[in-house]
Image: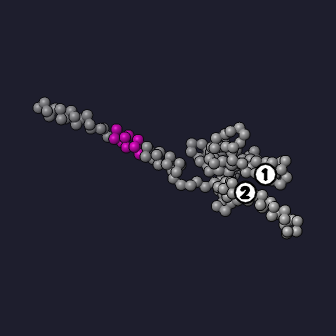
Amino acid sequence: MLIKYNKFKLMSIFSISRVNKILLAAVVALLIALSGILYWQKSGFEKPYYAVYLNTGDIYFGKISNFPKFSLSDAWYIQRNPQDAQNPMSLAKFEQSFWGPGDKLYLNEDSIIWKAKLREDSQVLNFIKNPQQAQAQQPAQGQLIQQEAAGGE
């Protein structure tokens, strides 16, 4: 009789109430969903690039993320060069600004006027993906334009 009592006591220790089973299942499901979302956000697919225009007149380019806040990663912006008549504007990487920000730019959604996905054949996207190649081609294109203006020589 002592053995039977211990068996039942052991069984009652390992038995879980129905509410606890439901709570455990919910926690496991949430953990699986959260890990799936984090994997999807980090490496699940290649995010497209967007142009984001703000009410300040600034335009930024980058990969949009809405979780946990609206942000752009791999952010670029249009930099004005008023002293350079040939290139009054240029594209600059946000993290290379003189104040040394990180690569992620958090934006206030109330300040956004519009956002647009960049096409694969976009010149801006080609520059972002190959900045060294695009900069090497820029002087050659400038020389070609000057030659055409001079009479095609």
Residue 89: which numbered mark, if any?
1
Residue 89 place in picture, x, y as percent: 78, 51
Tell whether 32 sits left or right of 138: left
Relative to residue 146, is residue 14 depicted above or below? above
Tell whether 80 sits left or right of 103: right
In the picture of the structure, the residue carrying the numbered disc 2 is 136
The quadrant the N terminus occupies is top left
Q: How many marks?
A: 2
Q: Residue furthest right?
A: 150
Instruction: State the SS at label 1.
Output: strand
Residue 100 place in picture, x, y as percent: 68, 39
Is 150 one of the magenta-colored residues?
no
Q: In the image, what residue occupies the spot 67% across and 62% down?
A: 121
Q: In the image, what residue occupies the spot 84% across and 65% down?
A: 147
Residue 76: which numbered mark, if any?
none
Looking at the rendering, the stretch of residues picked out in magenta corresponds to: 19-29
Going from the N terminus, do you reach mark 2 or mark 1 first?
Answer: 1
In the image, 64 versus 108, the foreground residue is: 64
**Label 2 sits on what residue type?**
Ala
**Label 1 sits on what residue type?**
Met
Q: Main secondary structure of the magenta part?
A: helix
Tell whether 43 sits left or right of 136: left
Instruction: State the SS at label 2.
Output: helix
